[in-house]
Image (cartoon, rainbow, N blue to C red):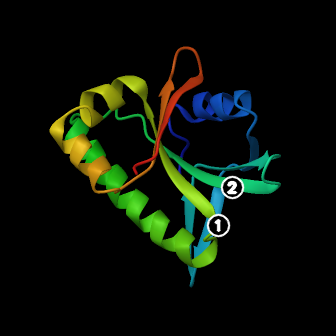
Amino acid sequence: MPAKDFYHDTVKNALIHEQWIITHDPLTLKLGKKDFYVDLGASQLLAAQKVDHKIAVEIKSFTGRSDISDLEKALGQYVLYQDILTEVEPERELYLAIPSNVFEDLFEEPIGKLLLKNRRLKLISFDPKQEVIKQWIIPN
């Protein structure tokens, strides 16, 4: 099992603060003989719709030497996990959780805007100091 990301507990606490129930820590995905580990699985009952909304959250701190290199690695993981989830838990939505300063540095630049425009990923931007989610970014 991989080591927890630096902001693992921060994102977990932020989700709990928004009334999410952490169901898996980590969420284990099995495909064939291989196991894959998404950082968190969570659910939230949407009372108005009487539906249990399930998400998987992969957390990335972007503390490497290059934000672009970290982005490339995170995107690769995201695509892999998304494809596996489509097969084994299609009702669960995958999100990439990143610190708000990384969102501002990468996703308000042309490369990030391109990824969002092309609907490549869903993001959670969080404030690491306050342990709160600043925004859910779901491309149209």
| N-terminal-most mark, 1 or 2 | 2
Where is residue 39? Give x, y as percent.
58, 49
Q: Nearer the viewer, residue 99 or 33?
A: 99
User: Which residue occupies 59% across, 21% down?
Assistant: 131
Q: Residue furthest front?
A: 48
Q: Residues within 10 Å of mark 2 (few under 14, many from 20)?
A: many
Dividing the image into 4 quarters, which one contains the N terminus?
Answer: bottom right
Inspect the image, locate mark 1, and give the three-letter code of the amino acid beneath it.
Answer: Glu
User: Which residue occupies 48% across, 64% down?
Assistant: 81
Query: Are discs 1 and 2 less than 8 Å apart at CB?
Result: yes
Inspect the image, locate mark 2, and give the three-letter code of the amino acid beneath it.
Answer: Lys
User: Which residue occupies 21% across, 36% down?
Assistant: 66
Q: Residue furthest top?
A: 129
Q: Secondary structure at mark 1?
A: loop
Where is residue 23? Give x, y as percent.
76, 51
Q: How many numbered tags mark residues here? A: 2
Q: Nearer the viewer, residue 59 or 91?
A: 91
Where is residue 32? Give x, y as percent.
56, 84
Left or right of 138, for residue 4:
right
Tag shown at residue 116:
none
Q: Secondary structure at mark 2?
A: strand
Which residue is labeled 2 in the image? 54
Structural distance between the alpha carbons of marks 1 and 2: 7 Å
**Residue 125 against residue 140 in the figure, above or below:** above
**Residue 110 against residue 101 in the figure, above or below:** below
Tag shown at residue 91:
1
**Residue 35 against residue 48 in the figure, above or below:** below
